[in-house]
Image: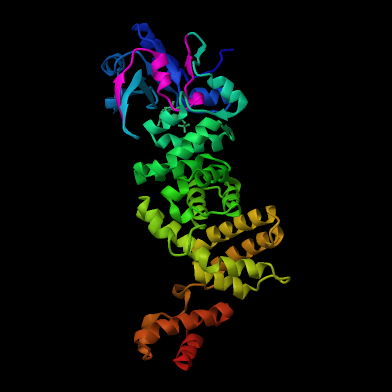
Amino acid sequence: MPLMQPPDAVLEITRVLEGAGHEVWCVGGAVRDALLGIPNLDWDLTTSAKPQQVRRLFKRTVPVGIEFGTIGVLDDTNVMHEVTTFRSDVETDGRHAVVRFGDSLEEDLARRDFTINAIAYSPSRDELCDPFDGQKDLAARKLRAVGIAKERMREDRLRALRAMRFAARFDFDMDPATWQAIVVSAPHLQRLSPERVQQEIVKTLSQVTLPSKAFRMWRDSGALAELIPSLAGITDIELRALDHLRLPLLPRRPQRLQTRLAGLFSASRSGTATATLKNLRFSNADVSWVGGLVERWHEVGRTMTEELMRPEAPTDATLRTWAGRVGRTRLSPVLRIADAHWWAARESGKPAPSQSRAESVYRRAIRIAYRDPVEVSDLAVNGDDLLKVGITGKRLGETLRALLQYVLEDPMRNNREALLTYAEQHA
Ligand code: ATP
Ligand code: MG
């Protein structure tokens, strides 16, 4: 049995490059993950061949990052494999490196961020090259910078955020010098573009099973205060809530990510999430959906908690009111965020609704929200109907809201005649 088994297409690329007299190695995430026994489909290759030589050796290539020496090689099934010429960084400014092509694998591994990401594997020789003892750190479950941590983080501030993501993702301990370097880096993190920071938040929320560990480090290192001040005071319970927004409850990935984002930003003060998300350059769709979830949570979270802690279960009318306040489509994620906070509170021995109460209310609320009228647009009358009976201006909106309240109490009231009568009396 070979030490690891890269996909056939990667073996073929290796064969072609070596056949032409070049050196070639698998590097980075796939090698690390193979050693951890985790599947990873992205096998990156590094080679002594220069980019133009790589291009000439393969039929179909894409110049994905030609200025950094990266060529994409397309295999028979149109999957792209990245082949990067050995590099060494000559100069850095805290984010961007001036690179030159290097002469050796060792030099290339030396510019990588963490020891566990700096292990190379030769498929043809079935041999590892591990000059920074990455395997030892994998075994000891330790995240450690390659070389002198403070210098490496000064070269590229993104590494501080990457370190916290990798440590949380694999549940590794942070090597003390690496942690110190992250703390020292924190005041300089504004050097990073908002897009980069956003990308790290998204990667952390989507790759890390228990994101609380990552964001606790963001908080304790000072990174949160620097990058997302509105979350600097996030509590341990709020952090733990993130761990409970997990996959089995939320089968669709995009929803999971956005719900987790909302879970994270639910720790910010009311009215601040939307602006923060915008500053981090989230898409307009994400800003409005996630920001909306956070604000709805601020509006109803406390009431929900109090209601669910009463001895008797909330009435259907109460559940309709919540559905009306947060909106039918937002009800499920808002309840999931609430549920996650309750889990975290219970784990910390704080008063919270019981799991069984939360589950039964969740099921009832969703059923009711999709069965009963809960929004103004569900009413059996609309604005035009009210205009016809002489209700205009500011009173029109008020009357529609009063009608909704009337119907939320009892959905049987949602018929034209009854509503028009009520509207005229109300007006
Ligand atoms: P993932 O599974 O998340 O893709 P990965 O280890 O492949 O993990 P990438 O961001 O794809 O991470 O980077 C590939 C490799 O490039 C890393 O394993 C590391 O060796 C190197 N690398 C990436 N970013 C940096 C950086 N900022 N500084 C130094 N080396 C880096
Ligand atoms: Mg990768």
Looking at the image, which residue is at 29% across and 15% down? 50
Q: Is residue 288 visible?
A: no
x and y, in percent, of residue 156 in the image: 38, 33
Q: Is 73 above or below relative to 339?
A: above
Q: Is residue 105 magenta?
A: yes
Quadrant of residue 76 in the image?
top left
Task: Reply above or below: 15 against 351.
Answer: above
Q: Where does the C terminus fall, quadrant-wise? A: bottom left
User: Residue at image x 48%, y 72%?
Assistant: 375
Q: Is residue 70 left or right of residue 326?
A: left
Q: Is residue 372 left or right of residue 194?
A: right
Coloration of the structure image: rainbow
| Image quarter where ligand 1 lies | top left
Q: Which portion, as a residue range, is magenta?
A: 97-124
Q: Residue 100: percent from the left, percent from the top?
A: 29, 20
> Which residue occupies 53% across, 26% down?
33
Picture coordinates of residue 80 (x, y %)? 37, 26
Q: Position of residue 121 (x, y in %)?
A: 48, 16
